[in-house]
Each structure stands twice: as structure tokens, then as C-alpha cells.
Amino acid sequence: MGKLEGRVAVVTGAGQGIGLAVAKAYVAEGAKVAMVDKRPEIVDIAAELGEGFRGYVCDVSQRADVESLAHDVQLDLGPIGVLVNNAGITRPAMLWKMTDEQWDSVINVHLKGTWLCTQTVIPQMREAGWGRIINVTSSAGINGTIGQANYASAKGGILALTRSAARELAGFGIIVNAIAPAAATPMTEKIRTDERFVETYLERMMIKRWAEPEEIAPTFVFLASEDTSYMTGQVLSVDGGSVVVR
């Protein structure tokens, strides 16, 4: 029996990168996975993956979309037991050049989206007396970064939201943790082709390479499982040691 046998998991940003790897890992462990993405292609991606996967189109920054998602997943797959808040975008710019659109779009997807999805699944988890919420943050939210103040601010906000939610929800059997990964994904492709950034970034990593999404996924399995019954409000850094090396 898999570690997630019988669970229903919602994974946002599941069309590619870490989200896709996590969805596959969850199904391999026995879960039914709602693959969520803003792009309509997610429905076909899930269908091609086969049994255990189902695609849903949703803009996580829009309350109506998120509420419809939670309702539809419960009807289609059953009560939501695991939520992975992974959806994300980047809009890089130096602080003095950043536009309102660049700031708002990143904050809305990362921070507001994490809050909306979390808030919306709580009733189902409270009724069940069990839940796992896994938020995706970043070393940028811990240490800051250059050229992405919007992203770092959103990820720092997710850290605070994780700890606050953990305090509020522990009494209902809902465990809330976060993971700070560093992986080679389509979202990080632009910065991974910037030689100056890569040189600086790898310099502060103990393991001198980017992870593959499949290397990150097992930590998400752990955080979604019964193994975390006495662990909440924590942040696991799976980033090659970059948080430690300063």
C-alpha cells in the first residue's frame, strides 16, 4: 500500500516542472490527484497520464475559480485531503524599474493564491479531521534576492502564512508545512541561462547543480503522509544547501 493510498490531492501549477513531478509521485503512492493549472492544456495532460489524474483549469488568484475547483474536486474525486500550493510565476525587474503589474501579478499568484486555496479547502479538511497543506516557498523568501523583490516578498509572505495557518489549524488535525526547493524547471529557465546569476547562485550551493523536479518530489510525498503527524509550521529546504551557505 502506498503512503497516500485513498487520499485526494490537489496540486496547483501541475502542468510542468515540480508540480507535474509531484502529481506523478502522489499517484504512484496511491492518491487521486487533481492537476490544476491556468492553461487549458492541463485537461489533456492529465488525460494522457491516465488513471489517478484529472485536470482542472483554474486561476488561483481568483476566488470564484478556486471555490469552483474545491467544489468540483470533491464531487469528482472525493474530499480533499492534501493541498499543494505550487502555482507560480516570475516577473523579474530591478526594484526601481518594477511596474505595478509586475508586482501585483506575482503577489496575486503566489501569496494570494496560496491563501485562497488554503482557505477554501479548510472546511473539507476540518470535516474529515485530517489534512495536509504544503506550501512552496523559496530561499529568496528567506534571504532575499536581486531583481525579483516581488517574488522574494511573495515567498516570504508564504513563510509567515504557513506558520500562521499551522497555529490556527493544528487543533483540527490539519498539518501545514512548506518546502523551499531549487530545481531546473520551465519557470527557472530564464535565470538559469543568465551566466552571472548562475555563477553567483551555484557559488553559494553545497551541491553545485540544479535539482531535477523528480529529486524534489519525494519530500512532497513525505509532507503529505502520516509521517508528519507531529510536524507542523516547518520549512524544509531542498535547495542544494544554498540556505546554509552564506
Image (tube, rainbow, N blue to C red):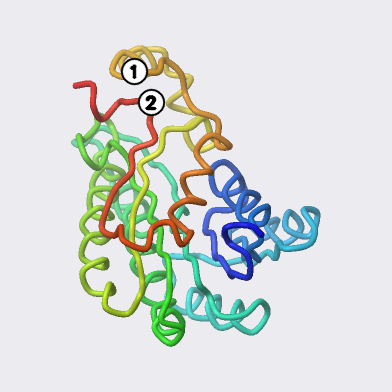
Where's the C terminus, which quadrant? top left
The type of residue carrying mark 1 is Met
Mark with earlier residue (2, 1):
1
Q: Are marks 2 and 1 in contact (CB under 8 Å)?
A: yes
Q: Position of residue 160 (x, y in %)?
A: 20, 57
Q: Residue at x 58, y 53 (%)?
A: 14
Q: Position of residue 237 (x, y in %)?
A: 33, 38
| Residue under numbered circle 2 | 240
Q: Residue at x 55, y 67 (%)?
A: 58
* Direction from residue 24 to residue 154 in the image, left or right: left
Q: Residue at x 26, y 42 (%)?
A: 152
| Residue under numbered circle 1 | 206
* Direction from residue 130 to residue 104 in the image, left or right: left
Q: Position of residue 9 (x, y in %)?
A: 56, 65
Q: Position of residue 220 (x, y in %)?
A: 48, 50
Callout 2 crowding tier (Cα within 10 Å): few <14, some 14–19, many ≥20: many
The type of residue carrying mark 2 is Gly
The number of numbered discs placed on residues in the rendered structure image is 2
